[in-house]
Amino acid sequence: MAKKTECLLSFTISAVETSYESASTRFSPADVEVDVAAKSLLVTGANSGIGKAAAKEIAKRGGTVQMVCRNKERAEEAEEEIMTETGNQNIFLHILDISNPKEIWKFAEKFKNEHKLNVLINNAGCMVNQRELTEDGFEKNFAMNTLGTYILTTALLPLLEKAADRGVITVSSRGMLVQKLSIPDLQSANGTFDGTMVQAQNKRQQVALTEQWAKAHRNIHFSIMCPGWADTPAVSSSMPDFCQKMKNALHAEAQGADTVVWLAVSSEAMKLPSGLFFQDRQPVATHLPLASTYTPPEDEEKLMEVLEEFSQKFKSTSPGT
Ligand SMILES: NC(=O)c1ccc[n+]([C@@H]2O[C@H](COP(=O)([O-])OP(=O)(O)OC[C@H]3O[C@@H](n4cnc5c(N)ncnc54)[C@H](OP(=O)(O)O)[C@@H]3O)[C@@H](O)[C@H]2O)c1
């Protein structure tokens, strides 16, 4: 990781990070002591890290879990683990690469005909450290973290609209605090490519998406959150030096998933306004004081327009194609 990036990240972490243990003393255990057997919840990236931990907690509470994962073998292993540990057999597996727009539309069309959905959890994410393109020509981090999240959510909104207690939760990161939304270079083609900063920009873009969705769809509850720094495969593989340095300060995966689970199952969370950013079960600011990261509304609207334009290019007009 470049020195400047490391400094910025360390600064941000010291400015915003709290200890999970101290934060959890104000949690109300009753919030998550609930039965969600009547609900269907879709978790992307449910085979690993925070997504798997969240899927397990939802399964323990009786919920139907729709796992959306890209690797069949890893996903089947995780599905087996979740079923065995929780005794919940209502776990369904769907294989999807969320960086492939056409496949997302196809998946959503099929899913809409076969399942109901109360809560969508956009957890899957990546940090690719070199500038690489998908087969459709999108920069890989943008394709998964921003465009993929946008298309999956957009495609499933009509299904969510039919359900009760409907919500969309996106797993972002407070690493985004170091980034101002940048529309002209969404594919990170200009300047030196720094995977950490590119991912932070994608996480900022997810904040903009959530705020815009919350404005446009008043009957669905949108939230976005930061899991804190958790010891997961993503962190150890994408940021090995950082992971080594922070080893003792990193959260366990279940701790990273705690706010996701709270947002997904708690009626208390649903009572809070839509479109907010959460950490440790409470709303937090999306900008640091004096950081000059404020986004004019027209930039957020422009982002939505660009994503909509990209997404429509891959929407098939006839089912199954
Ligand atoms: N851990 C942290 O400290 C931390 C901090 C801030 C934010 N986050 C966010 O938390 C979320 C979960 O990450 P994690 O830390 O739990 O890491 P993880 O264990 O590596 O999980 C990431 C998940 O995303 C999936 N994924 C990646 N690219 C995908 C694609 N193109 N299509 C479908 N699935 C894809 C991965 O699938 P494979 O197993 O096939 O790779 C994996 O299941 C991410 O959005 C991450 O940015 C994590």
Image: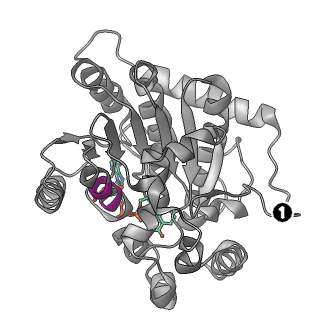
Q: In this view of the protein, which residue sits in the foreground, 197 or 204?
A: 204
Q: What residue is pinned by disc 1? A: 291
Judge from the rendering whether residue 96 lies leftward or rightward of residue 126; answer left or right.
left
Quarter of the image with the C terminus in it: top left
What residue is at 41 percent from the left and 37 percent from the top? 119
Q: Is residue 292 above or below residue 316?
A: below
- Ligand 1 shows up in the quarter that is bottom left
Residue type at tag 1: Ala
Q: Secondary structure at mark 1?
A: loop
The correct choice, above or below, for 128 with respect to 270 in the image is below
Q: Residue at x 64, y 24 (%)?
A: 216
In this rendering, does residue 30 appear at all?
A: yes
Which residue in the rendered view is the most extreme toward the right? 290
Q: Quadrant of residue 288?
A: bottom right
Residue 219 image-quadrant placement: top right
What percent of the width, then of the height, locates residue 220? Answer: 54, 28
At 57% from the left edge and 59% from the top edge, which residue is drawn? 281
Q: Front-most of 37 and 170? A: 37
Residue 284 is situated, as x and y percent measured from the top left of the image, at 70, 58
- Tell me the quarter of the image containing the N terminus: bottom right
Residue 70 lies left or right of residue 279; in this view the side is left
